[in-house]
Amino acid sequence: MFQNRRTVFLFVCSLVFVQALYYIATLQIKRNEPTIVNPTSLLILTSIYNKSSDNHLSSVQQNQVYSSNDNSTQTNHTVDISFITTAHNFTFANSPLNITVNQTIATTISTTAIYNTTAHPITIPIPFLNASSFSSFNYFKSPPDIYNSLPICNFSISNNDTSIYKVTINQTINSYNVIEENHGKDLYSGGHFIPTGCQTEQRLALIICYRNREQHLKLFLANIHPFLQKQKLDYTIFIVNQHGNDPFNRAALFNVGYIEAMKLYSFDCFIFHDVDLLPEDLRNVYKCGGQPRHMSVAVDKFNYKLLYSTLFGGVTAFNLTDFIGANGYPTVYWGWGGEDDDMYLRVVKKLKKSITRYPIEIARYKMIRTHDHTSSKANPNRHSILYSKYDYSRDGINTTHYNLHNIVFYKLFTLINVTLPEEPFEKIRTRLNMKRKA
Ligand code: BGC
């Protein structure tokens, strides 16, 4: 009996001991588990970088949302959004998200917002302050039977009184709100316009390379929209914005614009444009022809003279076939200079075509001067690459590498935010099989 009681006692003790061990062990495991705020929640950590009243483009520095967990039923996402200047309303997954930043200047995490979603990874468009943005790109056209019965859109340039074609350039820098009010009424999201009452023969993607030149951009938008609308064109404006600290790569940004635009719509005409150039004559029609066209022939800065006969910088127009045939722009020119001369050689040597130009009295441009811009440093390697006679199939559209952060459809334009990883010159030399100087 005693023996039995002792056995029962020992048995109970060991049960309690095992239970206690189990309890301690599970407590430990629980402690190591990540805290899940909500099974399907997105935790947004916002860091404030700088504060400026109208510095819109710097507010879209890093805005990809990264998932910390691959299991979509148990998602605890975090995102680090730098360069936010003040309160923002985000819209994604068609739901509004409000982030209010209380501190005006801070360098660390200042705001936490919880947003319910199951989708990931998610890209949050961070709107420009006071600029309208949309969650999608709508390429509305009337039903084909109605559209195809319309007359072809025609902008006549044959009036003998040529003064009617002269463009008065508006040099007032307004807020995006005001530009939208003045020129956005007939636009579809993403800066897309379709003339009414007629059908267009081409779909133009106007691609602008960009970095931190907001005053230029505002003047550009305020002037180019009315210009293109008067010419009755089906057009969309793409701003390809290079983030990060790598040197500016104008030509690679053009390729990015081309690649991303083609994912959205079947464009057949591409005009590659500097943001500081504004056309001064309406007869300079933004259409593509059977040859690549150099548009910015006569620029006020150069006394309306063509600097040299093979100049192909500023503004160029390519039909789809020609741009593909040239393998697009080169990607190996980091910093100022050379990429446009390279493109000229591609047209002549790879495409085996010549460039064309409108007459010098028509292809006139004003170069906008503002105080917020300093030019990029000249690329010391540009001549070596340009004169190396490399094979253009080795570099171009097919080798355009970029990190796409997001695409935001604003009222006045489509913004493509990218970083471009700089390729060191030694690698470029090897990849292009460039000959070393003897
Ligand atoms: C550069 C071009 C530039 C031209 C006019 C040339 O030396 O290589 O990129 O467009 O000068 O400034």
Image (cartoon, rainbow, N blue to C red):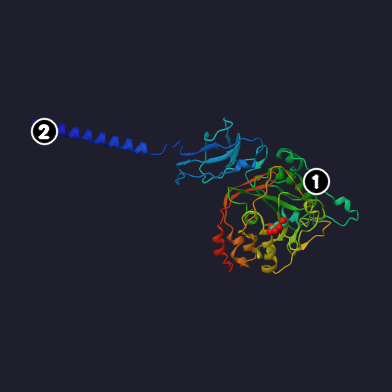
Give above or below for 177 relative to 374. above
Category of crowding for the residue at label 2, using alpha-carbon neighbours closer than 10 angstroms: few (below 14), some (14–19), many (at least 20): few
Q: Farthest residue in the right direction?
A: 160
Quadrant of the rendered image containing residue 307: bottom right
Q: What type is the residue that disc 2 sits on?
A: Asn
* Residue appearing at x 59%, y 43% in the figure: 61
Category of crowding for the residue at label 1, using alpha-carbon neighbours closer than 10 angstroms: few (below 14), some (14–19), many (at least 20): some
Q: Position of residue 169 (x, y in %)?
A: 80, 46
Look at the image and tell me in which quarter the N terminus lies: top left
Kindly indicate whether the residue at mark 1 contacts the one at mark 2 (C-beta within 8 angstroms).
no
Q: Residue beneath label 1, please?
A: 169
Q: In this view, does 5 lie to the left or right of 392?
A: left
Label 2: which secondary element: helix
* Residue appearing at x 61%, y 61% in the figure: 396
Residue in front for this viewpoint, 23 or 412:
412
Quadrant of ligand 1 in image? bottom right
Q: Where is residue 347 in the image (x, y as percent from the top left)?
A: 69, 65
Which numbered disc covers residue 388?
none
Q: Residue beneath label 2, please?
A: 4
Residue in front for this viewpoint, 233 or 240:
240
